[in-house]
Image (spheres, grey):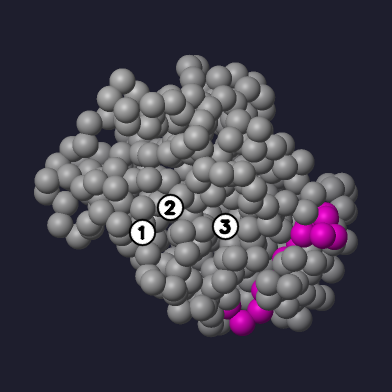
């Protein structure tokens, strides 16, 4: 692993090392270039980035310059799973001081709209979220961020673990939305990074039995190692749903109370709807397809509730507590590490895009 990216920048006119960031300039075109920070506001902190993970959305933007209705129309700094060290605090910041290690929640909501006032700030229509166009992300030497969205790390939680609070938050929020508890048998469709953190979160919330489904043997083996009671390998053929449901019900050894679709495809959603018990829930976490045809009428006749999930809210404190207490160990999810040089940035994204045995690719800056 190479050294951090500070060596990539030259010195400015005043001799201060220039802040550098990974800019998305076009399809499959990432370049480390200067990134000029906004002035520090009274409630802001300046953070020296130390750990930044690659998310599937980052790879999607790199390959397509768009994700759902978000379109990259001009150069954008990538990255949003991050942690770092406080370098400077605004005049009115009281709970943080330089040197504090923090995990950053990447979304800045308006706090004025109806959704924010109701406490569902993740649905704010004016959300400014790291690396969601046109907002710049955090794969940089330094960023400026609101202090109230920076959470101090416990002494026994590493910066890498702090960065993992972002993907873990998706699983925590999904489990909260589905009211997972000690009497909830859980099915998870998809053993990718989000499926795996949902598995971890379900366990932390007390789910007594968790079955996870995927098409890939390696990912299923990882899920088993991380605590899944049973794993089920399925096909990608929509015609096999009935057969897959039979396998799932056998593996569960009981009824499926809550299903999490962490892939978001027609096949996975159809399987989740059919496998869930009457009166159960299906939580749609993954967003693989914008549109899909699924058996809603039969699910409605059995009063299966469909619950949507978008990002998260108020999850960083509980994520940090789960990690601090040992209820969740996110370290096994980090399979590859890279430094912050042009070559390593390119290699890291190629590694993440290939999949294979890569789960979470992490930059150490």
For disc 3, the marked residue is 283
- Sequence-wise first label, 1 or 2: 2
Q: Decide: marks 1, 2 in contact (CB < 8 A)?
A: yes
The numbered dot on residue 170 is none
Image coords of residue 292 (percent x, y): 68, 39
* Residue 165 visible to the viewer: no
- Left or right: where does residue 316 sit relative to residue 184? left
SS assignment at label 3: strand
In the rendered image of this protein, does residue 95 appear above or below residue 184? above
Image coords of residue 361 (percent x, y): 63, 49
Which residues, given as a range, are shown in magenta? 207-219
Image coords of residue 320 (percent x, y): 42, 67
Q: Residue at x 29, y 48 (%)?
A: 87
Asked whether 349 or 170 is in front, the reply is 349
The image quarter containing residue 352 is: top right
In the rendered image of this protein, does residue 223 appear above or below residue 108? below
For disc 1, the marked residue is 101
- Sequence-wise first label, 3 or 1: 1
- Sequence-wise first label, 3 or 2: 2
Q: Nearer the viewer, mark 3 or mark 1?
A: 1
Between marks 3 and 1, how big is the CA–CA gap? Answer: 34 Å
- Left or right: where does residue 72 sit relative to residue 228? left
Q: Is residue 152 magenta?
A: no
Q: Is residue 209 magenta?
A: yes
How many numbered discs sit on the rendered protein? 3
Q: Residue at x 44, y 73 (%)?
A: 156
The numbered dot on residue 83 is 2
Q: Decide: marks 3, 2 in contact (CB < 8 A)?
A: no
Image coords of residue 75 (percent x, y): 49, 20
Number of other residues with Cα within 10 Å of mark 1, as a class: few under 14, some 14 to 19, many 20 or more: many
Q: Residue at x 60, y 19 (%)?
A: 26
């Amino acid at each position: 692993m190479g050294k951090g990216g500070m060596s990539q920048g030259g010195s400015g006119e005043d001799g201060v090392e220039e802040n550098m960031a990974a800019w998305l300039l076009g399809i499959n075109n990432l370049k480390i270039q200067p990134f000029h920070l906004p002035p520090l506001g009274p409630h802001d902190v300046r953070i020296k980035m130390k750990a930044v993970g690659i998310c599937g959305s980052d790879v999607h933007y790199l390959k397509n310059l768009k994700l759902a209705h978000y379109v990259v129309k001009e150069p954008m700094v990538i990255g949003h799973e991050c942690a770092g060290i406080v370098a400077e605090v605004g005049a009115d910041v009281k709970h943080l001081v330089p040197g504090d290690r923090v995990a950053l929640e990447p979304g800045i909501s308006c706090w004025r709209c109806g959704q924010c006032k109701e406490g569902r700030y993740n649905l704010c229509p004016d959300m400014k979220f790291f690396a969601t166009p046109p907002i710049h992300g955090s794969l940089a030497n330094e960023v400026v961020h609101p202090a109230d969205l920076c959470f101090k790390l416990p002494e026994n939680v590493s910066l890498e673990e702090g960065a993992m609070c972002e993907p873990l938050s998706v699983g925590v929020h999904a489990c909260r939305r589905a009211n997972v508890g000690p009497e909830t048998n859980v099915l998870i469709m998809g053993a990718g990074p989000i499926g795996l953190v949902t598995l971890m979160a379900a366990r932390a919330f007390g789910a007594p039995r968790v079955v996870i489904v995927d098409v890939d043997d390696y990912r299923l083996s990882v899920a088993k190692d991380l605590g899944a009671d049973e794993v089920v390998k399925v096909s990608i053929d929509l015609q096999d749903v009935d057969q897959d449901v039979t396998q799932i019900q056998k593996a569960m050894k009981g009824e499926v109370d809550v299903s999490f679709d962490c892939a978001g495809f027609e096949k996975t959603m159809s399987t989740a709807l059919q496998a869930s018990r009457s009166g159960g829930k299906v939580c749609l976490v993954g967003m693989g397809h914008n549109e899909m045809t699924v058996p809603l009428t039969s699910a409605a006749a059995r009063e299966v509730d469909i619950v949507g999930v978008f990002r998260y809210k108020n999850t960083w404190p509980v994520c940090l507590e789960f990690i601090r207490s040992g209820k969740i160990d996110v370290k096994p999810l980090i399979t590859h590490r890279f430094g912050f040089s042009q070559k390593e940035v390119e290699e890291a994204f190629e590694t993440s895009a290939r999949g294979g045995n890569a789960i979470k690719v992490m930059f150490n800056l």
